[in-house]
Structures are given as structure tokens and as C-alpha cells.
Image (cartoon, rainbow, N blue to C red):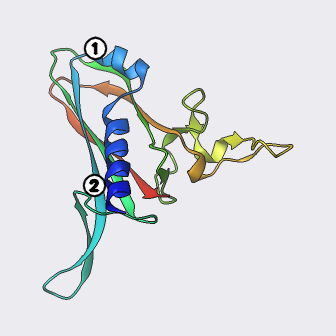
Amino acid sequence: MKTVTKLVLACAAAALAMPAAPLAAQQAASPITFTADVKAEKTVTGPDGKARIELVDPDTIVPGDRLVFGTDYTHAGDEPVSNFSITNPLPEAVRLAPDADPALEVSVDGGKTWGRLSALTVTDADAAAPRPAAHADVTHVRWVLPTIAPGEKGRLTYPAIIR
């Protein structure tokens, strides 16, 4: 299982680290830099006996485990940047967690169309009519930042669950 686990983590990290083509082109012409990471949620008990969730570097993960994918950005330029989009493909080994922000902009068709999950539909190969899209259907997550000021830093995250 460790080999599969490490492969899943490697694929997840690679997918997060490799932006979609439009982002790569936008990033090349931009003073915005990125770093990406994947953390696992781990329940730990503190000295007070209370359980709390910590984000840790994933070691061994199994189906059902929760991950948090993160992208940190920094604006190193001198002028504000407008309407900047950051797109993260979801690795096939994970699905968007049900408690993800419902306002998150997602795609269920490989990045062709975008919207809130509640407004999207998918048509299964064996279905006659579209059905409402589910968290497991999400292929990409995207943020559009209206303005990034010079020197601004931020972190964008989404929760996922190992399939």
C-alpha cells in the first residue's frame, strides 16, 4: 500500500505544481509567483485531552483520508494585477470534499466550463438526461482574483478526499 500511497501523493503534488496552460502563459508574463503543497489532516490529542486537527506532510494515506491542497502566491511587481486566475486540476485519485466552499468556482468537464458546483450538470455515458454535478465529478478548481496589489501574498486552499 505504501507504494500506491506514495504514487498517489506524487501524482497529486505534480498535478498541483503543474498549472494549466492558460495559467502558465499568464504566469510567464506576470510578477506573481506560486508555491504549492499538499497536507494531510491528522487528528491529534493535546495535553488537555482534547482532539484537534493538524495539517501534516502526508506519509501513508488510504481511501477516505482528507487532504488539503494549497497554493501560496506572492506579487513581486510594482503594479497591481487585475483578474488573475489560478487553476488547479484535481488528481484522479482524489475528489473534492463535501465541505468545500460552495462558492468555489469549479469545472466538471476538464476545464471547458466553470461555475459553482450547485449550478453544474453532467451526463453519464449510460444516462439519457443530465444529472446535478457532484463533488466526485469536479476536475478543476479555479480562483479569479479581482486585484492583487504589489507585495500582496495569499493562500488558496481546497479540501479533498482520497478515493
Q: Which residue is mark 1?
A: 28
Residue at far right of view: 128
Q: Which mark, by number, is residue 99?
A: none
x, y (%) of residue 94?
46, 52
Disc 1 versus disc 2: distance between alpha carbons? Answer: 27 Å
Q: Is residue 4 above or below residue 49?
A: above
Instruction: Find numbered disc 2 in the image and state the secondary structure of the residue it sits on.
Output: strand
Q: Which residue is mark 2?
A: 39
Residue at the spot x=31%, y=45% of the render?
10
Left or right of 2, for residue 89:
right
Q: Disc 2 marks which amino acid? A: Lys
Q: Disc 1 marks which amino acid? A: Ala
Callout 1: 10 Å neighbours few (<14), some, many (20+)? few
Viewer-side residue, 37 vs 84: 37
Q: Is residue 156 above or below residue 84?
A: below
Callout 2: 10 Å neighbours few (<14), some, many (20+)? some
Can you tell which quarter of the image residue 61 is in?
bottom left
CB contact under 8 Å: marks 1 and 2: no
Residue at the spot x=20%, y=14% of the render?
79
x, y (%) of residue 11?
37, 43
Residue at the spot x=86%, y=43% of the render?
128
x, y (%) of residue 73?
24, 33
Residue at the spot x=28%, y=55% of the render?
39
Can you tell which quarter of the image residue 124 is in?
top right
Q: Is residue 153 above or below residue 68?
A: above
Label located before the other in sequence (1 or 2)? 1
Left or right of 64, for residue 138:
right
Screen quadrant of the N terminus? bottom left
x, y (%) of residue 84?
36, 23
